[in-house]
Image (cartoon, grey):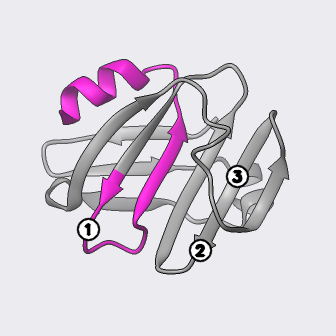
Amino acid sequence: MTDLALTADDLAVRFTPAEKALGILRNVTVPRTAITSAVLVRSWRREVRGLRVGLGLPGIRLLGTWRSRGHKQLVALRRDVPAVRIGLVGASYDELLVSTPDAERLVAELG
């Protein structure tokens, strides 16, 4: 399962080898100064937008990069696991949308 590690300086999103292959992804690290928002997402079906590069099993598992005009999302979502939507500026992605059992704690720490 995707791992989110928050330190005083940055946020790291780490993927398992299988996730990297299926989602065509690499691990991502963003400085905390690039984070503009963090919101708890309980139902993620309407949060993902654009064209997908990666794995898409609608309603079950979404993993990869979604692109739309002027917007790029890193998506790592699992059914029945809460997610966090993290807005970014000056990073390789505009938004991270990641499922994690610790979503509420992460939002509180970033808030």
The local crowd at label 2, few if under 14, some if 14 to 19, many if 20 or more residues have their Cα within 10 Å, is: few
Q: Which residue is mark 3?
A: 63
Give the structural element (helix, strand or loop) at label 3: strand
Q: Is residue 57 left or right of residue 21?
A: right
Mark 2 residue type: Ser
Q: What is the spatial separation of the Cα atoms under label 2 and label 3, in whole angstroms? A: 16 Å
Judged left or right of residue 76, residue 56 is right
Q: Residue at x 73, y 27 (%)?
A: 79
Q: Tag 1, which secondary structure? A: loop
Q: Mark 3 vs mark 1: which is more N-terminal?
A: 3
Question: Was residue 102 drawn as part of the magenta stretch in this picture?
Answer: yes
Q: For the residue carrying disc 1, how many other residues have a C-alpha within 10 Å: few (<14), some (14-19), or many (20+)?
A: some
| Residue depicted at 69% across the width and 32% down the height | 78
Task: Judge by depth and name the residue closer to the eye, 35 or 45.
Answer: 45
Q: Quadrant of the N terminus?
A: top right
Graded by Cα atoms within 10 Å as few (under 14), some (14 to 19) or many (20 or more), the crowding at tag 3 reads: many
Can you identify the residue that label 1 sits on? 89
Q: Identity of the amino acid at label 3?
A: Leu
**Furthest residue to the bottom?**
69
Residue 56 place in picture, x, y as percent: 82, 52
Residue 26 as seen in the image, left or right of residue 37: right
Q: Is residue 39 depicted above or below 65 in this figure?
A: above
Q: Residue 42 is drawn in which quadrant?
A: top right
Q: Which residues are magenta?
A: 87-111
Residue 68 is labelled as 2
Relative placement, left or right, of 86 versus 33 is: right
- Would you identify the image quadrant in which residue 44 lies? top right
- Give the label on residue 66, or none: none
CA separation in Å, label 3 and label 1:
21 Å
CB-based contact (under 8 Å), mark 2 and mark 1: no
**Residue 43 part of the magenta segment:** no
Q: Are marks 2 and 3 in contact (CB under 8 Å)?
A: no
